[in-house]
Image: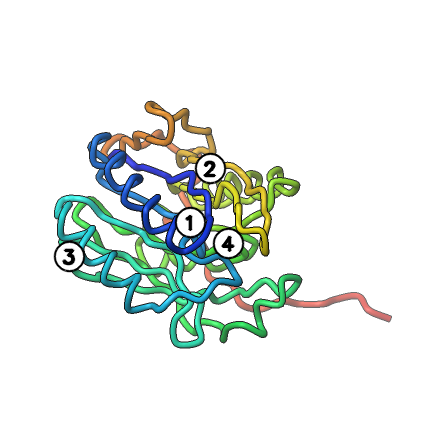
Amino acid sequence: MRAYLSRFVCGTVAENFQRLELELTRAAAASAELVVFPELFLSGYTQPLPPAQARELFRRASAAHPRTVFVFGTLSEQGRNRLTVWFGGNELASYDKVHLFRPNREHELWEEGKRYVVAALPWGRLGLLTCNDVRFPEQARALVLQGGATVLVVVAWWPWRRDHVWRALLQARAIENASWVLGCCIAASTNPAEPFAGAGNYAFDPLGNPLVPVEDVVYELPLDSPPPVLVDPRECFRPVTEVAVEGEA
């Protein structure tokens, strides 16, 4: 499976719509089967964007490339930070960010999502996470054990100064869940009201080994022949819920 992880630079909304068209052309030329865009890539935190306008663009792009799965993450809609997945011109799944990042006061912008989401796709199941969600291993574990996800995709607006944390968390989610993990972060924001340098994009195999892009931002995931793992969490997981505190005076 060929995955295209956009290194999107967020400017004005008008610039972003033009840049999205260019990115879609590049992804099609790369024969990508999965195309991922980062969190808030069309607007950032501060610019107004009518969700209907973005959705119409998503629909047209998906219909024009009917064999490609698109993860458009994310837009502000109905008081939520919402990621959408499209295939064949139709929205297959949507996920509202659960773990809002309070240092950026996200809890004042959006309500928390109430559920985790897995998208069932032609080549497997895709577990969906947004930025700060990657700090919470129980979410990734639920997507794998309960949702049957074989690939986890994390879209983000994560700063370059904490790139080492972003990379480490993505790699940890891959190792502990024996899953493919893709992390797609905003590259930068050139909006004068919101200057930003984003972290890198990363892909890891189920052993936590980094995947080297084969064509700049294109990664190949051999989903049919994953590397053998030493401990398979699907087989070895034990649902213990009791926590005993013993020996207190």
- As drawn, the label of residue 211 is none
Specify few, some or many for label 1: CA neighbours under 10 Å numbering under 14, 14-19, or 20 or more.
many
Expressed as whole percent of the image width and height from the top left, the position of residue 38 reads: 42, 49
Please, what is the three-letter code of the amino acid marked with disc 3?
Gly
Expressed as whole percent of the image width and height from the top left, the position of residue 85 reads: 28, 57
Task: Please identify, in this view, whether the residue under mark 4 or under mark 1 is nearer the observer.
Answer: 1
According to the picture, the residue beneath numbered tag 4 turns out to be 131
Vertical position of residue 78 compared to residue 74: above or below = below
3D distance between C-alphas at marks 2 and 4: 12 Å
Expressed as whole percent of the image width and height from the top left, the position of residue 8 reads: 42, 42
- As drawn, the label of residue 38 is 1
Please, what is the three-letter code of the amino acid marked with disc 2?
Asn
Work out which quarter of the rendered image holds the C terminus and state it.
bottom right
Q: Secondary structure at mark 1?
A: loop
In this view of the protein, which residue sits in the foreground, 19 or 59?
Answer: 19
Q: Earlier in the sequence, mark 1 or mark 3?
A: 1
According to the picture, the residue beneath numbered tag 3 turns out to be 89
According to the picture, the residue beneath numbered tag 2 turns out to be 201
Q: Secondary structure at mark 4?
A: helix
Q: Secondary structure at mark 2?
A: loop
Please, what is the three-letter code of the amino acid marked with disc 1?
Pro
**Label 1 with label 3: CB-CB less than 8 Å:** no
Residue in the picture at 44% in, 76% down:
79
Work out which quarter of the rendered image holds the N terminus and state it.
top left
Q: Earlier in the sequence, mark 4 or mark 1?
A: 1
